[in-house]
Amino acid sequence: RRTTLNGGMILSKLSLQGGDSCSFIMLDATFVRKFPGKNLPFFQEIRDHYTTEEPLVEVALDYADVVKGTHIETTLAVSHRWMQPDDPDPDGEQLKALKDFLNSPAGQKIERVWLDSACMPQDQPEGSRSEEDAAAFERMLKEVNRLYLGTTVLILLDMSYVSRFWTQFESWLSMQFATPDGLKPAVGTENERHHIVCIQNAAEQSELHEKMLIQSWATKTPEQAHAFLSKPDVTVTNQSDKEEQLPKIKALDASVQGALSEVARQIEDKLAASEAAAARADAELAAWETENDAKAGEKNRLKVAARQAASAVAAARLAKEEHAQAISSSVVPAMMKRAEAVLAGLSMSD
């Protein structure tokens, strides 16, 4: 769903959206790839002054999307540190790294990009953010873990990255995937979806810094991540952010378990509904043939409806089988489909 955002009214509606779904504002990846400036403007400037390009996209993300990996192939979340309190990327090195990634083979399928400074209303200069924008900011901030659990993640690693609460939290999330037993390490499996680019002084020993980050976070359980991030030497600009997010870490296992159970229930419900619809369609076709003492032709309305209903049943059964196979193989469903597509392409090229 694509929406051009003008003014705070639409954001106010997003911030008040109920249910399990949370709407996030993202950048069209083409806009980022072609952006001519040294660094990306803040969200309000993009919204108010780049209306011709329509760079902002609204995406509703629920936990079912997260555990199924619906957005992994097409959506990128950026984990980075603000270099200055009022400017995340003063020398443009972060934007350069982001554009390089988007133009690389690993980023070529990315359609949307989430970057906090460009996708959430910022209070820059301080006191300038409207009430509507502030409400939208808080709504998205509370649910930001969904982005780092359910998308491809680009980590822009600098020397101070590992001292900050948000960046370490995001790194840990990016190295996990959802299973019926809770979160499990994704690194070294088919579920791996993070990419690390060392910037600034960290680029001098990139392999070392990348290895240290992975070793620090890849295998931590939610309890271990909570214990580490709770320490006072893990700093955060707004202490309230840390206080709000820490309890969610302990609850993440239950959250993903519940989401996977709900996905399975929805699949079962869809199969049952399609089977009932197919049975009704077959009964109506049989009644017509009995009443008319004739076999319905292929173009007969009831024959067509019965055929379509049978196809819907077959599709629902296949979806159930694929989901079960992905879960039993410890692979995020969308990642399994992507792997199958790659294998199919390789077979065709042979």
Image (tube, rainbow, N blue to C red):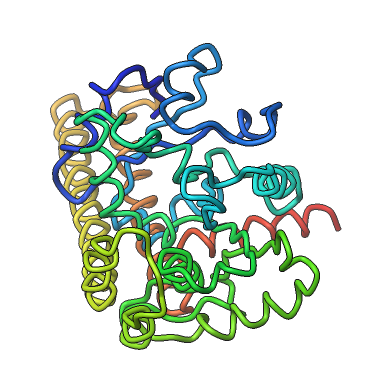
* Picture layout, residue 275 above or below residue 124: below
Residue 161 in the figure: left or right of residue 200: left
Residue occupying image coordinates x 31% and y 59%? 238
- In depth, the one of 17 and 188 nearer the eye is 17
Residue occupying image coordinates x 23% and y 68%? 243
Residue occupying image coordinates x 76% and y 65%? 203
* Picture layout, residue 44 above or below residue 324: above
Residue 35 in the figure: left or right of residue 57: right
Classify residue 285 by image quadrant: top left
Quadrant of the image for the N terminus? Answer: top left
Q: How many marks?
A: 0
Q: Residue furthest top?
A: 52
Residue 223 in the figure: left or right of residue 153: left
* Picture layout, residue 169 above or below residue 345: below
Residue 28, position as x, y percentages in the image? 54, 32
Quadrant of the image for the C terminus? Answer: bottom right
Classify residue 67 by image quadrant: bottom left
Residue 332 in the figure: left or right of residue 143: right
Q: Residue furthest right?
A: 350
Residue 269, position as x, y percentages in the image? 19, 55
- In depth, the one of 179 and 305 nearer the eye is 179
Residue occupying image coordinates x 27% and y 58%? 267
Residue 202, position as x, y percentages in the image? 71, 68
Residue 282, position as x, y percentages in the image? 22, 41
* Picture layout, residue 170 above or below residue 18: below
